[in-house]
Amino acid sequence: MGNLGFSSAMNARLEPLMSELQAFPTIGALQRAYRTGQLSPAEWISIVLREISFSDPSLNAFITVTEESALAASRQAERHLQSGMPLPPLFGVPIAVKDAEVTAGIRTTFGSRVFAEHFPQETTLHVQRLLDAGAIIVGKTNTPEFTLLGETCNALGPDCRNPVDIALTTGGSSGGSAAAVAAGLVPLATGTDTAGSITIPAAFCGVFGLKPTHRLIPVWPNWDDWPQLYNVGPITRSVEDAALALNVTAGFDARDPYSRRGSVPNFVTALDAPLPKLKIAWTPTIANQPVDPVCSAAVAAMAETFSRLGHEVVLASPDVEPAGVIAEDIGAAEEYRVRGHLLAQRELLYPDTAALYDAGRAMDASRYANALVRKQLMTHRFNLFFDSYDLLLAPASATPAFPVRQAPSMIDGRPVQPDWVGFAPFNMYASLVGCPVASVPAGKAGRLPLGVLIFGARGADALVLQASEATRRAGCWG
């Protein structure tokens, strides 16, 4: 673990990374401890808050820690437990909420100095459903300003650091959530995603992240913020915990015009259903974009695992162009539409944010329309691809995690854009086409976590989860 000016005592304490928290690594383990009386919600929330106070000065996973309200909620959970009433699905589970989702009465900054003291009056539908299921918020996690960067840095405080090695980036934009989960501080954290913001940090930190089918989890308020791309989803240490979170958060809501209609399966039950014989495509790259050999090798190894499990596995890839320019053009236009008025407070904005607003303001209508047409063509070709294949495996990043603010300009001997478009070129496909994608741990290169993306057709979230769990049971996670 890199020292970066932190004390050797701090690094030594972080090396075994919170052994007390590892005693109950999943939601199921924690709730069994509650039911048997081995542990009480108040005791556990106190332990979590203590560990956050100790570890976060080096990780910077949290922007706000909600100690007072979390302890109050844990005492309320104690009374519920003592009453003998049925326990809700996330009873007493500490969760972290990305600071891009509004939470009533809890500071929500969006990673911006403009909103440094912003206390909303509403809670997102996503978070409220988690709270209604019994979860307890212990804090709001670090995010780049308005989620716009591929690394988790902003002007509010220090950069978020990777628990694997605090010299390394977590990626972005849900880097604080991935770090909190990877460090064992919480079993579940929320992520938001418009171009890979859930799956990139999950891959870099060695945890599980799911970007669901577009608006399977409805978005409200602010449903019109990047409405064609924006989604929310879970970051966890297990597939089962992600399925449990999806069980309580998925489902239509009329307040979101993009909300997906139709019945929602029981995602947890689906994990134990026999996995049908699948036709699975795998690829070391998409659109011939450069990839570090260790990342493409992880995909090949997972493909071999599926083949060994009896599935038909084929080397194939959708016939699409690189997604970066499309995502950047749509993103600049959408971000300027929603928040361009903040240029009036340019002195408070992160420089990259202001530059993006300038680009959005300067974009002409034909360029934006062209990006939307190319997005639709990409969606069409992915849909056709999934007429022939059940799943697609691809690298979760083009390189393992790298030192903070040192994104590579070369990958596998080829020049790349030294930001998220270069080091994570595949994740945004799922956001552009609206299909589900999971970032699954796939072993390590030395100490560096590797991840593999499992894409499915729109609506195939249960299948993506089933396949992800199959990789864990087969020993792919390492």
Image: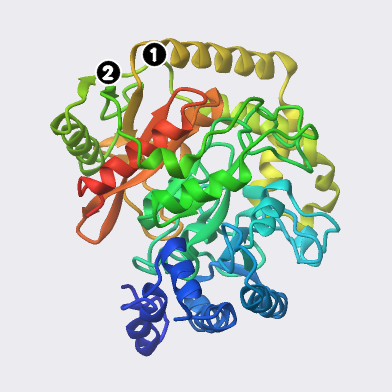
| Residue 35, x across and y down, in percent | 49, 72
Residue 17 seen from this side? yes
User: Do residues under tags 1 and 2 come within 8 Å of each other at their CB atoms?
Assistant: yes
User: From the image, which quarter does the N terminus lie in?
Assistant: bottom left
- Label 2 sits on a secondary structure element that is loop
| Residue 14, x across and y down, in percent | 37, 79
Residue found 21% across the figure and 23% down from its top:
313
Q: Pointer 1: what residue?
A: 385
Number of marks drawn: 2
Residue found 27% across the figure and 42% down from its top:
471
| Residue 32, x across and y down, in percent | 44, 69
Q: Nearer the viewer, residue 99 or 236?
A: 236
Q: Residue farthest to the front?
A: 84
Badge 1 crowding class, 10 Å Cα cut-off, few under 14, some 14 to 19, many 20 or more, is some
Relative horizontal placement of residue 355, taking residue 347 as reference (left or right): left
Badge 2 crowding class, 10 Å Cα cut-off, few under 14, some 14 to 19, many 20 or more, is some
| Residue 220, x across and y down, in percent | 76, 42
> Hey, which quadrant is residue 46 in on the image?
bottom right
Residue 418 seen from this side? no
Task: Tell me the tag on residue 264.
Answer: none
Relative horizontal placement of residue 453, taking residue 323 as reference (left or right): left
Q: Amino acid at mark 1?
A: Phe
> Hey, which quadrant is residue 422 in on the image?
top left
Q: Nearer the viewer, residue 174 or 75?
A: 75
Q: Nearer the viewer, residue 333 or 26?
A: 26
Q: Amino acid at mark 2?
A: Ala
| CA–CA distance in space, label 1 to label 2 | 9 Å
User: From the image, which quarter does the C terminus lie in?
Assistant: bottom left
Give the image's coloring scheme: rainbow
Relative horizontal placement of residue 55, taking residue 86 as reference (left or right): left
Q: Pointer 2: what residue?
A: 316
